């Protein structure tokens, strides 16, 4: 599988600027939602890069994560407002999880202290929130925003985190967490039970899973030196060995080769005054979930 940048895609109106795009998401119509740190937080294009609309002006402290669920609703994670909010595709506010502008105690475990992203289980619709810059937790919520449980604590052992920066769920409801400063992706079931991990990933910042592929193809994005790549390795235990849980999970990642999506600039060709970091990944539209919800 080969990927090539489409130069000039996404034409902004005159005088507009992205500033930084913290996250991207694609709906079932292949419309692309860019969550930015500029004056216009949510900017929407069609698949060909034609500007459609924007919303969220004056409502966002700092963009960090964006997720579109199977119903087409949009979830925004604002790390400086310490909230996760739900919107219609047109920008109507529906729900807020968290206390706006009131962070939880630093590393106290309660939601939220600078949360980073939301993932949604395709089977049940339950939400998982990575939290974050000021916490070392994953929080689970029901589809109507009620807190169910949390797990994680600071550290390097299995089930501990050092900046959970992003997360996704596969088609079976397993939760994959980009444990950025521990340089790994950890894997849990829907009840927070540790299943395994992928090691030796330099500061993984963004995750995406294509559930339409055989068992799921995972993409891991990081700083320029890391490169985005498809992940094919089975989970590993804390010592880097394949454990008994790993063998049970091999069906999720079997038979795929790791492929680099982006080649970083060659030595001597760095962009002056800029640091490159791939913060979000997305591929394709909304994915259906089971008709009969169940808690994974």
Image (cartoon, helix red, strand yellow):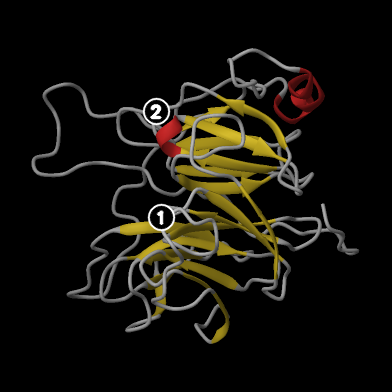
Residue 61 visible at all: yes
Q: Residue 76: horizontal and vertical position, in percent? A: 49, 69
Which residue: 71% across, 57% down? 287
Q: CA distance from mark 1 to mark 2?
A: 21 Å
Q: Residue 219: horizontal and vertical position, in percent? A: 54, 36
For this view, does 53 lie left or right of residue 16? right
Of residue 134 and residue 42, the one placed in the foreground of this image is 134
Residue located beneath label 2 in the image: 202
Q: Is residue 100 above or below residue 238?
A: below
Q: Is residue 87 above or below residue 191?
A: below
Mark 1: give few (<14), some (14-19) or many (20+) Cα within 10 Å: many
For this view, does 17 lie left or right of residue 286? left
Q: Residue 179: horizontal and vertical position, in percent? A: 49, 38
Residue located beneath label 1 in the image: 134
Q: Secondary structure at mark 2?
A: loop
Of residue 187 and residue 161, the one placed in the foreground of this image is 161
Q: Secondary structure at mark 1?
A: loop
Residue 261 visible at all: no
Which residue: 37% across, 57% down? 22
How many discs mark residues in the rendered view? 2
Considering only order in the chain, which callout, 2 or 1, is on the residue closer to the N terminus? 1
Mark 1 or mark 2, whichever is nearer to me: 1
Q: Residue 247: horizontal and vertical position, in percent? A: 78, 19
């Amino acid at each position: 599988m080969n990927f090539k940048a489409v130069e000039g895609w996404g034409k902004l109106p005159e005088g507009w600027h992205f500033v930084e795009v913290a996250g991207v998401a694609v709906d079932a119509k292949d419309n692309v939602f860019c969550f930015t740190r500029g004056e216009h937080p949510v900017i929407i294009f069609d698949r060909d890069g034609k500007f459609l609309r924007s919303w969220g002006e004056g409502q966002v402290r700092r963009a960090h994560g964006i997720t579109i669920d199977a119903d087409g609703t949009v979830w925004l994670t604002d790390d400086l407002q310490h909230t996760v909010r739900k919107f219609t595709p047109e920008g109507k506010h529906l729900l807020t999880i968290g206390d706006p502008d009131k962070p939880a105690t630093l590393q106290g475990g309660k939601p939220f202290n600078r949360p980073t992203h939301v993932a949604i289980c395709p089977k049940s619709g339950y939400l998982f929130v990575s939290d974050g810059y000021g916490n070392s937790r994953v929080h689970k919520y029901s589809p109507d925003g009620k807190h169910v449980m949390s797990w994680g604590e600071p550290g390097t052992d299995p089930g501990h985190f050092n900046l959970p920066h992003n997360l996704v769920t596969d088609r079976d409801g397993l939760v994959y967490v980009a444990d950025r400063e521990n340089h790994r992706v950890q894997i849990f079931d829907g009840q927070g039970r540790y299943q395994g991990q992928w090691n030796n990933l330099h500061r993984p910042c963004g995750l995406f899973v294509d559930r339409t592929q055989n068992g799921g193809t995972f993409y891991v994005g990081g700083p320029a030196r890391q490169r985005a790549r498809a992940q094919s390795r089975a989970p590993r235990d804390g010592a880097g060995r394949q454990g008994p849980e790993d063998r049970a999970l091999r069906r999720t990642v079997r038979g795929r080769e790791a492929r680099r999506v982006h080649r970083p600039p060659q030595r001597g060709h760095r962009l002056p005054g800029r640091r490159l970091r791939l913060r979000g990944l997305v591929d394709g539209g909304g994915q259906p979930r089971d008709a009969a919800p169940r808690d994974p």
